[in-house]
């Protein structure tokens, strides 16, 4: 039989292919392969599936309904998805009759292109050895469709229609393959293999270099909010953000000694400027992979942390997944097979002040091992959160065919690495009685959010162009389920603290950062300090530090503005608490595009330079050098009050807002006051 119902799922078999449609939450999971079995990986679909679909089998087609989406599969294997109104949401792509001669193969309708003789079908498999295939999934495309999500890419366009995305992780890039369509569906590509997504006007294609099966999940909803909430119901939501994390975080590259950390913290405390988190960046350790303080520069970390706690500050320390050959753990981890393998040559994955291998975050035993070291050397001394850097991981040469994980070849599963990395510390902190873990991490994949992942956008340049890119990145991460996201305020590379042009950029970035899920000042500032001990062979003394990066490191007008926004962030704490609770309970993005709350307003879908922080505050950041006013579209269906002037506007119009250098345009929805007047 072509169609069968097995354990509540609809199974299609024809020739060498089989396709399974399974009810999963408020959507349908689709798997397809030319193998004789499906893998046992659920990947991002970690939450229980309720399996309450309705299956109907006919002679020429079969149907599965689950939630608001219905799937139809024909006797030849062609898939079409409908909403509750019986409108087509998405259907597979096949070359139309007019372009060639019709033929049949492998349970698909295929067509021969008369010029290239290329067979064009919706699902194609090319064996690359063993049970693995280079696969391609094709869907028909609506040229007017708008697409959002898919993670973090450094580009100007928030609408992904027309974009080509590499589905692989890099410093500043995170592939989180869930998209939300203006047509009313959400699609999770539930496969961590390395590949590419192309959202053309003629067709959508998702391809993988090496994998065992096609695996995706689709849901439908009347609003973007419904779609995102249904997605987070099957992949997880963030924990409730701890109170200390809602304020201001102080960071720089890099505090070199314990005394330097305390001097900065004491000065903030003396000035009465609230700081929630103080950060100790990389190379505070003897060797990469030792996962401990270097006693030469941090002789009493427990005492340092006690003093920080007394000032109301938590300490975050940097963790790298790299294990240097000189590390005290290298030989044991190598012998226990806890490191990422290479397929040929020297067992090296990164070259950074030595030769290093990454710990294998896909290996449950390796996850336990790294947490045990962090617990013994950091947690027991009072460290309460961790900065999980290099989380892609950042191979010195990103040749994915060269590396192998516990879960398989890197080509097949590389994108799951940051999930395992976050999970190692989430599970460890849960075991120590922490109810709501949060850890800063430089990358994510689908489902990372449920492991307390606060993703930041990596080492972006200090330019207005990249400031604009961060808005796009943050909003699309939220649409992909990553509710906790932030960026280095001021950018990471290239900011000179003596340069007036950088001062303007920093002020505009600081204003934007105030209205991100986490407000964290960081950067590799110029001019650099010399290393403490450049002749040493290892340890923190061999690495230089960036210039000072505290609020008083800048001219008075910059300092005054930064202090104003730090206090405003504190003033907003009740509102921030409210929107963090919603992110925890439903997966609602903390920062969201205007159309998220105003999907009936067509113009709201076109706005890519403003956003909602929560539901009741519209933020219009200034992202161009020299700009002192800007146009702002106020969505239809609400009234909007300018937080500075107090003028109230009806929605559905474009207004010109004043934007002096020390202020960002903000608008309260329907008369709600988010913060008290601080002028």
Image (tube, rainbow, N blue to C red):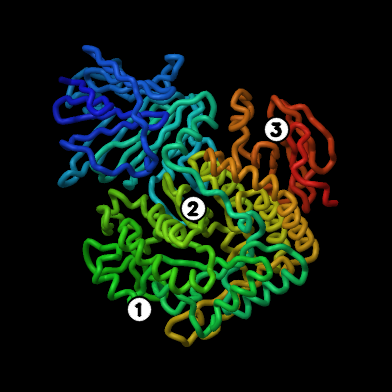
Q: Relative to the observer, which residue lies in front, 75 or 194? A: 75
Q: Quadrant of residue 191?
A: top left
- Given residues 656 and 189, the one toward you in this image is 189
N-terminal of the two: label 3 or label 1? Answer: 1
Measuring 50% from the left and 35% from the top, which residue is drawn there? 228
Note whether 60 is above or below 333 in the view shown: above
Residue carrying label 3: 633
Separation of residues labelled 3 and 1 (CA atoms): 57 Å
Task: Check disc 2: other Cα within 10 Å, few if <14, some if 14-19, many if 20+.
Answer: many
From the image, tell me which residue sits under label 1. Answer: 328
| SS class, disc 1 | loop
Residue beneath label 2, please?
A: 453
Count residues near mark 1 (Cα–Cα under 10 Å), then give few for <14, some for 14-19, many for 20+. Answer: some
Sequence-wise, the earlier of marks 2 and 1 is: 1
Residue 531: horizontal and vertical position, in percent? 54, 81
The numbered dot on residue 491 is none
């Amino acid at each position: 039989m072509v169609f069968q119902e097995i354990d509540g799922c609809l199974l299609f078999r024809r020739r060498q292919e089989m396709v399974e449609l399974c009810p999963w939450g408020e959507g349908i999971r689709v798997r397809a392969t030319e193998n004789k079995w499906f893998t046992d990986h659920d990947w991002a679909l970690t939450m229980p599936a309720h399996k309450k679909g309705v299956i109907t089998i006919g002679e020429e087609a079969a149907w599965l309904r689950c939630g608001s989406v219905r799937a139809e599969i024909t006797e030849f294997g062609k898939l079409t998805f409908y909403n509750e109104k019986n409108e087509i949401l998405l259907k597979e792509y096949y070359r139309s009759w007019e372009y060639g001669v019709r033929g049949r193969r492998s349970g698909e309708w295929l067509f021969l292109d008369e010029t290239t003789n290329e067979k064009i079908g919706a699902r194609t498999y090319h064996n690359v050895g063993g049970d693995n295939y280079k696969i391609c999934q094709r869907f028909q495309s609506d040229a007017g469709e708008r697409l959002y999500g898919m993670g973090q890419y450094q580009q100007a366009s928030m609408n992904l229609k027309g974009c080509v995305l590499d589905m692989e992780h890099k410093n500043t890039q995170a592939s989180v393959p869930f998209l939300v369509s203006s047509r009313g569906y959400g699609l999770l590509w539930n496969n961590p293999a390395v590949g590419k997504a192309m959202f053309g006007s003629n067709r959508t294609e998702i391809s993988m270099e090496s994998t065992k099966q096609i695996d995706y999940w689709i849901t439908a909803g009347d609003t973007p909010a419904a779609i995102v909430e249904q997605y987070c119901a099957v992949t997880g939501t963030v924990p409730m953000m701890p109170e200390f994390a809602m304020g201001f975080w102080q960071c720089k590259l890099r505090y070199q000694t314990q005394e330097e950390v305390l001097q900065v913290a004491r000065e903030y405390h003396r000035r009465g400027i609230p700081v929630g988190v103080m950060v100790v960046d990389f190379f505070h350790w003897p060797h990469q992979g030792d996962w401990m303080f270097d006693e030469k520069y941090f002789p009493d970390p427990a005492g340092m942390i006690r003093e920080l706690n007394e000032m109301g500050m938590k300490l975050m320390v940097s963790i790298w997944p790299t294990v240097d050959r000189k590390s005290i753990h290298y030989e044991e981890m190598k012998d226990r097979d806890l490191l990422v393998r290479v397929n040929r040559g020297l067992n090296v994955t990164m070259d950074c002040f030595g030769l290093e291998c990454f710990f294998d975050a896909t290996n449950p035993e390796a996850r336990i091992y790294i947490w045990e070291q962090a617990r013994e050397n950091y947690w027991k001394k009072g460290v309460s959160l961790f900065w999980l850097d290099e989380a892609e991981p950042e191979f010195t040469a990103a040749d994915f065919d060269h590396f192998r994980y516990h879960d398989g070849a890197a080509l097949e599963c590389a994108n799951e690495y940051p999930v395992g990395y976050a999970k190692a510390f989430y599970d460890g902190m849960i075991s120590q009685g922490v109810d709501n873990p949060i850890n800063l991490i430089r990358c994510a994949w689908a489902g990372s959010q449920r492991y307390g992942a606060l993703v930041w956008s990596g080492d972006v340049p200090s330019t207005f162009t990249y400031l604009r890119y961060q808005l796009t990145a943050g909003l699309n991460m939220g649409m992909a389920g990553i509710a906790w996201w932030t960026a280095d305020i001021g950018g990471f590379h290239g900011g000179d603290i003596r340069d007036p042009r950088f001062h303007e950029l920093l002020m505009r970035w600081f204003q934007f950062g105030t209205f991100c899920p986490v407000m964290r000042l960081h950067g590799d500032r110029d001019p650099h300090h010399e290393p403490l001990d450049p002749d040493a062979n290892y340890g923190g003394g061999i690495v230089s530090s960036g210039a000072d990066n505290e609020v008083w490191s800048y001219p008075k007008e910059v300092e005054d503005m930064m202090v104003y926004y730090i206090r405003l962030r504190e003033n907003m704490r009740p509102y921030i608490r409210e929107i963090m609770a919603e992110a925890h309970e439903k997966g609602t993005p903390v920062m969201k595009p205007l159309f998220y709350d105003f999907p009936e307003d067509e113009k709201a879908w076109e706005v890519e330079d403003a956003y909602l922080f929560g539901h009741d505050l519209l933020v219009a950041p200034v992202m161009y050098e020299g700009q002192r006013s800007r146009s702002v579209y106020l969505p239809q269906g609400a009234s909007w009050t300018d937080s500075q002037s107090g003028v109230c506007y009806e929605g559905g119009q474009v207004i010109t807002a004043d934007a002096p250098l020390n202020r960002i345009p903000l608008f309260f929805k329907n008369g709600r006051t988010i913060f008290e007047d601080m002028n």
